[in-house]
Image: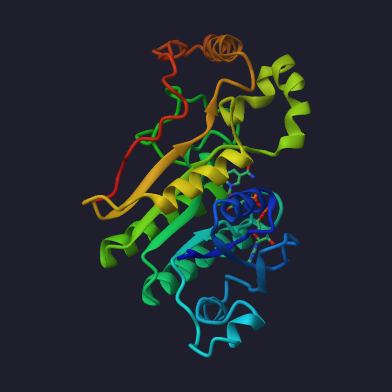
Amino acid sequence: MTKRILFTGGSGKAGKHAVAWLLKAGYQVHNLDLVPLDLPGVTNLTVDITDSGQVFNAFSMHTDFSDLEHGRGVQPFDAVVHFAAVPRILIRPDNVTFQANVMGTYNVIEAAVKLGIRKIVIASSETTYGICFAEGHRDPHHLPFDEDYDVNPMDSYGLSKVVNESTARAFAERTGADIYALRIGNVIEPHEYDRFPDFVARPEARLRNAWCYIDARDLGQIVHLCLEKIRSRFSGLQCYERYRYGQSVPEAAGRALLSRRSVQAGDGAGRGAYPKPQDPRGARFSGGA
Ligand SMILES: NC(=O)c1ccc[n+]([C@@H]2O[C@H](COP(=O)([O-])OP(=O)(O)OC[C@H]3O[C@@H](n4cnc5c(N)ncnc54)[C@H](O)[C@@H]3O)[C@@H](O)[C@H]2O)c1
């Protein structure tokens, strides 16, 4: 039977590619967003996820007029993919970013588990590692980032994503729901590859992203794999580091830049000696219970 997916933030930069991927994979996708996604096959509902009542209603309503026809009431949803957010600092005031992301995620996960939806995928972020939006410069203490890397951001957005992972973990611990937090790198859409020559010419421009990115279409595939993954005997939250490493600038250029900066800062202790990147596409289990 077709799996029915609730997708928050499906109208956004990343969401629209993930939604398109899921549609192609045969899922039925219902998009909950402040603005609709104009894509054949998707149903839309205008929802503000910071309002718990709206989220509970959206999760327990028909998706379309055609749902009235069978007379069997609202059909259950199989999974929730949660992308809706203020996607970085400096779009909204810091407190609004924090509040919208933290309460939005709480509301979405709470409604899902209390309405019996056991599979949830949420968008976390590379910014949890505290490099991207650091005040001043903070060099990574090792590369590539992995799931064991310290999460210690200074900014309101990165902090909201750390809290969201804790929220997800709490609900997973309490209910045994199967929840995946994707620490997404900088999202690149197909038309944005013309930015890469500049990335190569100016490696310092990508330092805050640690030279990482994720193709939006790959993100769709990752979400798909999370939805298909049969739950292991581990219950709880699983966090995955998702990015492509070292493909936006030559790896050597990035390493040289970091070494140079470390020397200039007079801190050579261990820095600049970064381990060789492993397979950048290999996700690993971390955390969870
Ligand atoms: N773009 C990136 O490089 C990047 C990197 C890491 C993580 N992420 C995360 O991935 C997710 C998607 O990011 P994006 O780049 O597509 O952002 P986006 O701003 O393009 O899309 C976010 C969507 O969420 C919707 N939204 C915002 N507030 C809402 C609310 N209160 N209620 C309902 N809908 C709301 C917006 O209308 C928008 O369509 C976010 O959670 C973001 O934090 C993005």
How many numbered marks does the figure carry?
0
Q: How is the image coloured?
A: rainbow
Please determine whether, in this image, residue 215 is positioned above or below residue 108.
above
Residue at left offset 53%, top offset 10%: 259
Q: Quadrant of ligand 1?
A: bottom right
The x and y percentages for residue 121 are: 46, 55
159 or 124: nearer the eye? Answer: 124
The x and y percentages for residue 184 are: 53, 41
Residue at left offset 36%, top offset 65%: 118
Q: Residue furthest bottom?
A: 71
Q: Residue 69 falls in which quadrant of the image?
A: bottom right
Residue at left offset 31%, top offset 61%: 172
273 or 17: nearer the eye? Answer: 17
Q: Is residue 32 left or right of residue 146?
A: right
Q: Residue furthest left?
A: 233
50 or 238: nearer the eye? Answer: 238
